[in-house]
Amino acid sequence: MISMMLRFTNYLRYEGFSVSTSALNNAIAALEWVNPVRRDQFYSAMEACLVQNIEEREKFARFFKRFFEDKTPLEFEHEDTTFRMQAGEFADQLRQDDDYISKIIADYIEGDVLKLMENIGDKVPFRQVENDVASGLGMSKDKVRKEIIKRINLLVDTAEDFAATSFHMPKDQRETLSEFLVDRLREAGALMKQEPIKSHGRQKLLPWEKQRTISTISFDKLTLVEHEKVKGEVEKIAKKLKDALSRQRKRSSKGHIDIKSTIRASMKYGGVPFNVRMKSPKRKKGKIIALCDISMSVAFAAQFMLLLLYRLQNRFSKIRSFVFIRNTYEISHFFTKHPLEVALQKAVQTHNIGMGQLTNYASAFKSFLENYPNVINKDTTLLIMGDGLNNHNDPKTEYLKRMAEKAARTIWLNPEEQEYWYSPSSAILDYEPICTQMVECATIDQLSDFAKNLIL
């Protein structure tokens, strides 16, 4: 059961969920007081121990369900046989040193976490430590921890060299092996130091996501590599929509008679309309006001939407872009000088927007109305991109109502899957009746469908 708990917390950390070592110890201790077979007891105990603040409860519920109820495996278990054999071979090389510390680290790399966990905290160990550095005899937990940390610092380079010289594996697999071994070593070191394991964003897909196409992966589950691919897909979508607009204009020019022009042309034939003139009806170009939540949970989705809008800007008379977390700032002028990614970065730096803040939609809408009172008119489509997580702040719907009353239509694009819209910390239930549309926009396919309906 302890091994399973380590796997679960590794999965949470892999997803960017912060789990401290003390929280993990509390969760393991709680197993003695609950029946793990009883889902309600087990879930309540894990939530109480592992969730540090109320804003993370919805995320935890989602990850818990995915791991335990969907039987989500960890990445290492889905690597092929060659990968597992190489990781096992590295562990066996460590065991050849035939000392207590090396065996602990080797076991941890292969997934047996008990010996490592014995040496965390000051309580009586789960299993008795057997014997000095070679056998563990007479060593305190603090001494064992220091020896493990010292050994790990030496082994990181060894692990990288081991993976680099595994020439019977393809290059990408050698890189994956190196990353896995180094991550496991550093993870063990962080546990010994009793500090949180840092997460800087996933670099590749989880195994169950590898079965899906990029067009259906939710924006919040994209890896850094996949993020770049999606940007390429947005460019392709923009080109297809531009082509569709051109075809639409050509078709319309064949189906509408220009009466005035036809009559004028027929005068030289005595009023007989030998040459029927056709015209293309001019579609009125509207103005777009894009108001984007750029908090960490939805920043990628906002970036994709803005990229698509600016690639199709000829379809609109004007596009003005605004971003917010707590206060709203216009960033339109940055796009005239910089590419999209650079423009967003410059905007965040210039306005000193703290990306770690908790989102407050009411504050953002109020700020927009106060600083940009005349931006919205009856030719405006107001686009709001955000998940609606208001962190239990008062939604103050009167601000959004004032904005919606000025606009021709108000469309809210929600990058969160619809089943999670109405959580306790979300204000979507309050804002939805005010909007003309509330659209799920969690994948590239959904973003493409929305853009098609917007411009065609």
Image: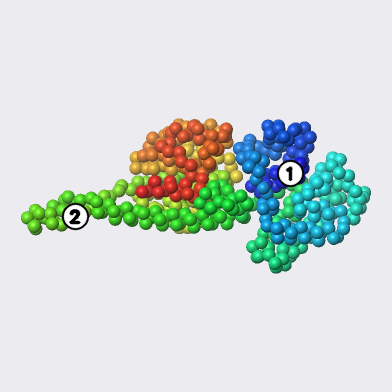
Circle 1 packing at 10 Å, graded few (<14), some (14-19), many (20+), is few
Task: State how far apart marks 1 and 2 are (Cα).
Answer: 76 Å
Q: Nearer the viewer, residue 7 or 382?
A: 7
Circle 2 packing at 10 Å, graded few (<14), some (14-19), many (20+), is some
Check disc 1 and report the residue beneath it.
4
Q: Nearer the viewer, residue 424 or 375?
A: 424
Q: Position of residue 300 (x, y in %)?
A: 53, 49
* Left or right: 434 as drawn, with respect to 423: left
Q: Secondary structure at mark 1?
A: helix
Check disc 2 and report the residue beneath it.
277
Q: Which residue is at a point 43% across and 36% down the rendered structure image?
A: 435
In this view of the protein, can residue 351 be seen by the observer? no
**The residue under label 2 is which amino acid type?**
Arg
Q: Which residue is at a point 83% across and 46% down the rendered structure image?
A: 119
Q: Nearer the viewer, residue 323 or 420?
A: 420
Q: Secondary structure at mark 2?
A: loop
